[in-house]
Image: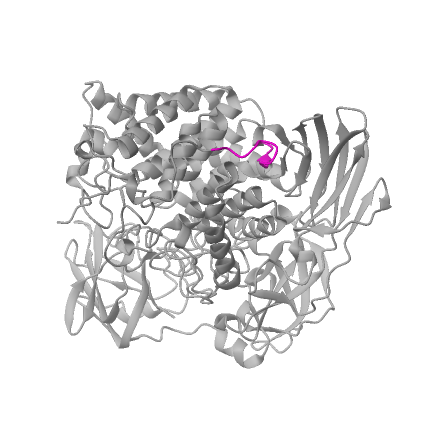
Amino acid sequence: MKTNTVICTLFILLPFISYASIKKTKSSDVLQPVSFNEVILEDNFWLPRLQIQKEVLVPFALEKVRPAMDNLRKTGNYLNGVKDELPFPHRFVASDLYKVMEGAAYLLTLEKDSALEHTMDSIIDLIGNAQEEDGYLYEAHTTGVSASHEHWGGAGMGDKPYSWVVHSHELYNMGHMYEGAVAYYLATGKDKWLKIAEKNARHINHVFFEGDPKYNNGNPVNQAPGHQEIELALVKLYRTTGDSLYLKMAKKFIDIRGVTYQPEGEGVMAPSYAQQHLPVREQTKAVGHAVRATYLYAGMADVLAQTGDKSLQPALDSIWNNIVDTRMHITGGLGAIHGIEGFGPEYVLPNKDAYNETCAAVGNVMFNYRMFLAKKDARYVDVAEVALYNNVLAGVNLDGNKFFYVNPLEADARNAFNQGLKGRSPWFGTACCPSNIARLIPQIPGMMYAHTDNDIYCTFYAGTSTVVPLSDGKVTIKQTTNYPFDESVRFEIKPEQSKQRFAMHFRIPTWVGKQFVPGKLYHYLNDKPAEWKVLLNGKEVSVKQHKGFVTIERAWKNGDLVELQLPMLVRYNKAISQVEADIDRVCITRGPLVYCAESVDNVAMPASYVVNSSEDISITKGAGALKYIDFITVPAHSVQDKDVHSLTLLPYYAWDNRGDDAMIVWLSENDSLANASIPKISEYISDIKATHTFDRDDVYAMLTNGYPANSFDTSIPRWTSWPQKGEEQIVEFILKRPIALQSFSVYWYDDGGGVQVPKSWSLEYKQNGEWKTFPIYVTDEYRMLKDQYNMVHPGKDITTEGLRLRIVPLPHAAAGILSVQIEEVK
């Protein structure tokens, strides 16, 4: 088997890089965010979310990541000679724990919580005990359990430390640990975890860039990780500690990507999958896995901002433009394509089949906010805002305890959630998305304000108060607004020094102009800009925009008031013609929010409605959990019900909070398109065969057009293998034609008695008349979950003539299926 032990170790291959010293840009020129622990939330939008996270999400998530804690405990016992079970082998389960801990650390700034601190300190003790003396931390390799894991390719982690960096997630895990350690230090002042992180960072620097006899035969590993994260985490570590070593390391990892190592293969081993196809300065387009990509771009922007390395700027500018001009959904979602969870061809932005992983939207926020810090340009905040308020917030319900991994822009009642789940899920086998939400939302206060020595930038708008340290004295700011539903944003400014002179920069969002979000993809049908205003102490002032900000520079006095009036018109959006999925469709937005239609608010199926872009619009408040949310009603008719004359919409982030119903973002402009949008029964399957079918059941029931209410839904027909308990069953699906398979989903029947979810299952596909093992995607699993679809994707492109489902029932039970879904690559 091929390994990656042949690695470049000489820096002479990188003539354009100088590592002797990094000249940090003068502090007066570097834009620094006001830290999360220095901003107090006082609003009705973000503060309740943080309170819910503290009361609901953090305890729930900490319980869900307990297996990762157990692995750390077992590893610590192994190192200390204490008899115990060995940890189970896993590449990235520790990262989910670190992300949840990072989110918990941010929330400690809301109010002191000794119980939560005690829990955190106990976990930090586990982390420290699991760390080897030289700083290495990776449970599977420390204990040797990786030997029982697939070593190379796919989900492999290598048979020893740093032997399969392309997929082991060793550095990815540590990056998330660094971020958690920094957050906990800033929130509490406790540095034990920070010291653990620094010890590991110095170890990685020694092994990767100097050489250690214990690793890689003493040669520097000199390879960038397959999953980016450590790069931006190292910059955060540098900014917290002031140790330039970490900034140099971040720069080195970025500089060697695509230079010292390039994978060979397809799918997850394709050079572009982890952006290793070219040196970063030669990359011009967003390709590969979307989460990895945005984490890389965020790290590059960090290094640009902190070092002034302008050689990174052309690549970042080109990639950013490629994203907003060709590859971003109007919700800010990235990575439209299933399979690699990543970027597809330019302008391929499907709606019902969109992937848009929640983590990719998190990455989009991080990338764009860092681009703002590097370039002081508001358009980056505008993109981050759209991704945050729409795609990120859609990833978690209003109660804070259920999540989306995938975020489509259309869902119907039968296959409503093409990630294979009935609505949101409490957790996932690959739990990166819930844990990412747990850590991102509490960071939002730290993105509200940024400053140089004599400039204050107001970026995100929310009811907040903070103190900004400028060179001539501190400035207290109190912001009052009900944004994103309020058109007014007010600032009270109190300088420490009398008549202190400095500049205040206020963002005028792209959405008040001729389009909703920067880029060439989307524009308003009526592109007349809204008439925004800036008032100083109650009087309108004339200001000019520069890079999306308006600036008031003056000698400020205590109590000066600035008010922004940002008219929130209801706007109809069109996509450019290259986006085929949105031809003859419109999307409705208001302020920074994308709106969607959901079944619960409307008589007919959402996809059946036709809108005519009328300005006869009404806005009302929701009720219950949605009481602070503005609903929009527009004129429309349904091709299903001729008596319908209006359509009600709610913000996309709030859908699927009142039941698992159909939803649509891009609405039809004509009857024929609406008729074609109404879901129909599977068009792919011509016949089904099973080894055994109970004589009162029907094998064709798997083609049911209704979404099962649950796994014990007896109101619809089903297939079972009763009374054949414990006997392997094969269900073969004969296709009408060969298809490029996107996904396969199965909804199990379980009556709690003689028919139960199986012990295991697997899939085979038919190609050129031969049955082959299904190449399951690297993060998918053959799950046996009740009350939802269990979906798998191919890990590489396959075209199949048929599918065969192998089912191993429990010894005391038969198997049963309510529904199967097969999706083709569009």
Q: Quadrant of the C terminus?
A: bottom left
Q: Which one is in front, 66 or 46?
A: 46
Answer left or right for 688 relative to 622: left
Camera sees residue 598: yes
Q: Is residue 768 above or below residue 478?
A: below
Q: Which one is in front, 269 or 656?
A: 269
Residue at 66%, 52% in the rendered image: 509
Q: Quadrant of residue 593?
A: bottom right
Q: Which residues are magenta?
A: 23-35
Q: Position of residue 19 (x, y in %)?
A: 38, 35
Residue extending furthest toward the left: 1
Residue at 57%, 78% in the rendered image: 639
Camera sees residue 101: no
Q: Which one is in front, 308 or 747?
A: 308
Answer left or right for 551 relative to 222: right
Q: Main secondary structure of the magenta part?
A: loop
Q: Is residue 364 above or below residue 188?
A: below
Q: Is residue 343 magenta?
A: no
Q: Is residue 29 magenta?
A: yes
Q: Quadrant of residue 214?
A: top left
Residue extending furthest toward the bottom: 672
Q: Quadrant of residue 446?
A: top right
